[in-house]
């Protein structure tokens, strides 16, 4: 297995599956992805993904994580991943992507964060697997055809 050499933006769903015991196959895959990027700083998260992670993992009467555990995990993510703040340029580019490509605004914001930071791959199950939008390719790391060995 070679060392990963290009940056990848990791979408919220990968982070959430790390802790979702109801999805054991996806949980194992998410853990393998996290391991792939540990120590490289080539895995990237947008601040939007971190906000979504907090919301998804702590909501409802039976949250996936306690608030304390969520806070610890946010700190761990900062040690493993490069964090991309959402700024005006990303919001503006997302609005253009929303307008021109008919994707939801929040999905467009993830795409814009990657595009404006020269990240050519997004790991997400939300977008169409293999689709490329203005130089950014979407890869579903939970699809049957995903081979983690090709990335690491």
Image (tube, rainbow, N blue to C red):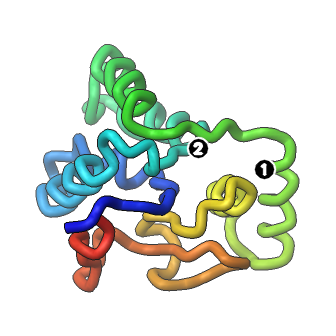
Front one among 126 and 83: 83
Above-or-below relation of 143 to 50: below
What residue is drawn where x is 26% and y is 85%? 145
Question: Residue 60 or 83: which is nearer the viewer?
Answer: 83
Q: Which residue corresponds to the image point at 51% horizontal and 56% vertical from the top-left?
A: 9
Q: Which residue is drawn at 30% across and 29% down?
A: 61
Whether label 1 touches label 2, CB < 8 Å: yes
Disc 2, SS: strand
User: Secondary structure beneath disc 1?
Assistant: helix
Residue 83 quadrant: top right
Dividing the image into 4 quarters, which one contains the N terminus?
A: bottom left
Answer with the quarter of the image where residue 54 lies: top left
In three-dimensional space, the C-alpha distance between marks 1 and 2, rounded to whole angstroms, equals 10 Å
Res 105 seen here: no
Label at residue 90: 1
Residue 85 picture quarter: top right
Residue 78: % across, % down: 45, 29
Judged left or right of residue 35, residue 59 is right
Crowding near the residue tagged with mark 2, few <14, some 14–19, many ≥20 C-alpha atoms within 10 Å = many
The x, y position of residue 109, in whole percent, is: 70, 55
**Residue most extreme to the top:** 68
Tell me: residue 24, above or below residue 99: above
- Give the numbered dot on residue 46: 2
Sequence-first tag of 1 and 2: 2
Measured along the vertical axis of the image, is residue 137 above or below residue 49? below
Please tell me which residue is depicted at 26% across the width and 35% down the height of the picture: 64
């Amino acid at each position: 297995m070679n060392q990963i050499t290009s940056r990848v933006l990791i979408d919220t769903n990968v982070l959430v599956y790390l802790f979702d015991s109801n999805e054991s196959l996806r949980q194992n895959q998410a853990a393998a992805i996290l391991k792939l990027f540990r120590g490289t700083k080539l895995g990237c998260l947008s601040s939007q993904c971190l906000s979504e992670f907090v919301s998804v993992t702590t909501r409802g009467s039976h949250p996936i994580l306690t608030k304390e555990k969520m806070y610890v995990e946010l700190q761990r993510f900062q040690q493993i991943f490069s964090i991309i703040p959402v700024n005006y340029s990303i919001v503006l580019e997302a609005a253009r992507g929303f307008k021109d490509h008919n994707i939801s605004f929040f999905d467009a914001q993830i795409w814009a964060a990657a595009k404006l930071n020269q990240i050519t791959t997004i790991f997400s199950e939300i977008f169409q697997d293999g689709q490329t939008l203005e130089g950014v390719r979407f890869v579903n790391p939970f699809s049957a055809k995903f081979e983690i060995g090709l990335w690491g």
